[in-house]
Amino acid sequence: MPEKHPSAEDRDSPLKDVSSRELREIDRLIAPNARIIYEAIRRAGEEEIQRSASGLAWSGLAAGMSMGFSLISMGLLQAHIPESTWQPLLVRLGYSVGFLIIVLGRQQLFTETTLTAILPLLARPQRDMFLAVIKLWGTVLGANLLGAFAFALIIENTDIFAPTYHRAFELLAWEQYTGSWISIFIRGIFAGWLIALMVWLLPASGDSRFWVIIVITYLVALANFTHIIAGSVEVLFLVASGSLSLWQYLGNYMIPTLLGNILGGTSIVAALNHAQVVAGNQNRT
């Protein structure tokens, strides 16, 4: 193994005679900088872009259905916890369940791609890359929503859950759907921002990945921000029950939420983090 020469930081340290083993341990304890996180996510995005359409579709379908467990978890908690001012603090913990399944299970979720797929595009802004990103987004979004609708149809049209739970699901869905077009859009920006931040944090999280997912998604739920897949499971439950029309879902919820999520994920997180890494590279040169 080649000998490791001390860096300027090592030479300036008041600790002398630090062994190579200790230096490796120091390197391990230092949090990765933005350049390392950026490159890890960019490469993951490149891999996603190169995946086959069928692979993306099946993974996206699984993610859309897995997200249904967020609604189930919240509904079960809501049905069993007495009504009070603090009830939402516990009920909203269930929102994280679907995200845990999807992220730890490596399933394809649309809002994650607002960061992972955009970094390769920002690094190589060419027509072929743009078309590849659009293809990825279209495939994953369509599969996610199909899975979400399938899940909503199953829980509405079967007797898996008692009427008490169905009432809880419906109450949660109306809370998600309530608001003006602009309100849903702005809530979508914050949701897209937070989920993209979660993706940015995960490479450096190590053994804390579980808690990073829970904390970020719990905040999304507690603030009632609108997430295009998690929220669609809820609102599509209303469509499946006949309480809403499909056109109401599309015009009043899906479109503003989708636009908000894309804006929050791509503009605020992807673009700003790309800018800081590019600026850092220019300073290094």
Image (cartoon, rainbow, N blue to C red):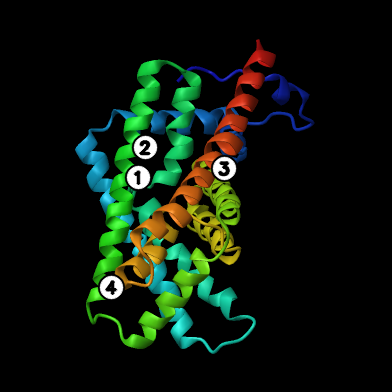
- Of the numbered discs 2 and 4, the one sitting upstream in the chain is 2
Looking at the rendered structure, the kind of residue marked 3 is Gly
Few, some or many residues within 10 Å of mark 3 (<14, 14–19, 20+): many
* Disc 2 and disc 3 in contact, CB within 8 angstroms: no
**Dot 4: element:** helix
Q: In whole angstroms, how far apart are the C-alphas of marks 2 and 3? A: 15 Å
Circle 1/circle 2 CB separation < 8 Å = yes
User: Separation of disc 3 and disc 1 at Cα?
Assistant: 16 Å
Q: Earlier in the sequence, mark 1 or mark 4?
A: 1
Q: Is residue 182 above or below residue 71?
A: above
Dot 1 falls on a residue whose secondary structure is helix
Q: Name the image quarter holding the N terminus.
A: top left
Q: Amino acid at mark 1?
A: Leu
Name the residue located 26 percent from the left edge and 67 percent from the top edge. Answer: 153
Q: Give residue 264's mark.
A: 3
Real-space CA distance between mark 3 and mark 4, rounded to the nearest whole angstrom: 31 Å
Residue 185: give x, y in percent of width and height.
Answer: 56, 50
Q: Residue at x 49, y 52 (%)?
A: 209
81 is higher (above) or lower (below) than 93 = below
Q: Please name the residue that numbered disc 1 is placed on.
A: 141
**Dot 2, how many residues are within 10 Å of its Cα: few (below 14), some (14-19), or many (20+)?**
many
- Give neighbour class at mark 1: few <14, some 14-19, many 20+ (Cα, 10 Å): many
* Residue that carries the numbered disc 4 in the rendered image: 155
